[in-house]
Each structure stands twice: as structure tokens, then as C-alpha cells.
Image (cartoon, helix red, strand yellow):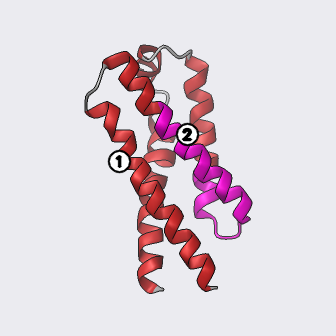
Amino acid sequence: MKTQKIIYWSTTGLIALFEGVMPALTSQTKLAKEGIKHLGYPEYFGDALVIFKVLGVLALIIPKVPTRIKEWAYAGFAFDFIFAAISHGAVDGINFQTFFPFIILGILMLSYFSYHKLKATK
């Protein structure tokens, strides 16, 4: 059980950094806005995305959040990573930026499975 807690909090912490802290701190930079524009999305889409990412991270890291809400947060992040890969692939072709969201998706899946293992032991 201790190993599962370490896996859960390590992977969930990485997701929180990548999807909550970094976007919240960098979303208004010129580089971030150019990135959203480069992919063909309107500027307001980036702002909405950051809000939902921060809410999703809060749902994952706050222990008292109901399981159903956590499930929605995991699903939202999975869709985010899949569509990020599709967007990068469609605009920039196949390169590292196309596959990087799948690496983060793998980390998200480790978090998800370890979360359910922890829930089963309670």
C-alpha cells in the first residue's frame, strides 16, 4: 500500500505541475498565446483551457473530492492529451511535440490506476 501511495502522489504531483501550476503561471505569456494561435485556436480557448486544467488538478489532489468528480477530471485530462497530440500532428507534422502528450497520458494512467488500487484497499 505504501508503494501505491508513492506512485499515486508522485504521478499526480507531476500532472499537477504540468497541467495546473505551469499553465496557470505561463498562460498569459506571449509564447503561450502564440502557441494557441499557431494551432489555430482562438485566444479565449487558451484561457478556458487553463481554468479547466486548474479545476481538474484541484479535483485530483484534494482528497475529499468525490470519486465521480475525480473520474471526470481524469477523463478531461485524457481528452486534453489526446487532442493536443492530434492538434500538434495536424499543424506541425509528426515530431516530439506530437508524442509528448502521450508521455503525459501514460503518467496520468499510472495516477488513475494507482488511485483505484488505493481506493480498493480502503
Residue at the image point whose x is 47% and y is 55% from the top: 108
Task: Name the residue carrying label 1.
Answer: 103
Of the pair 26 and 95, the residue shown nearer to us: 95
Which SS type dominates the magenta stretch?
A: helix
Q: Is residue 9 above or below residue 38?
A: below
The image position of residue 110, as x and y in percent, is 44, 63
- Where are the magenta residues, as a range? 57-83
Q: Is residue 100 visible?
A: yes
Task: Name the residue carrying label 2.
Answer: 79
The image position of residue 53, as x and y in percent, is 57, 43
- Left or right of 104: which side holds 64? right
Q: Is residue 78 above or below residue 30?
A: below
* Amino acid on which the number 1 mark rests in the picture: Ile
The image position of residue 74, as x and y in percent, is 58, 52
Of the pair 6 and 117, the residue shown nearer to us: 117
Q: Quadrant of residue 52?
A: top right
Q: Name the outermost residue toward the left.
A: 95
Q: Quadrant of residue 93?
A: top left
- Left or right of 62: which side holds 32? left
Q: Is 75 colored magenta in this rendering?
A: yes
Quarter containing the C terminus: bottom right
Of the pair 60 and 115, the residue shown nearer to us: 115
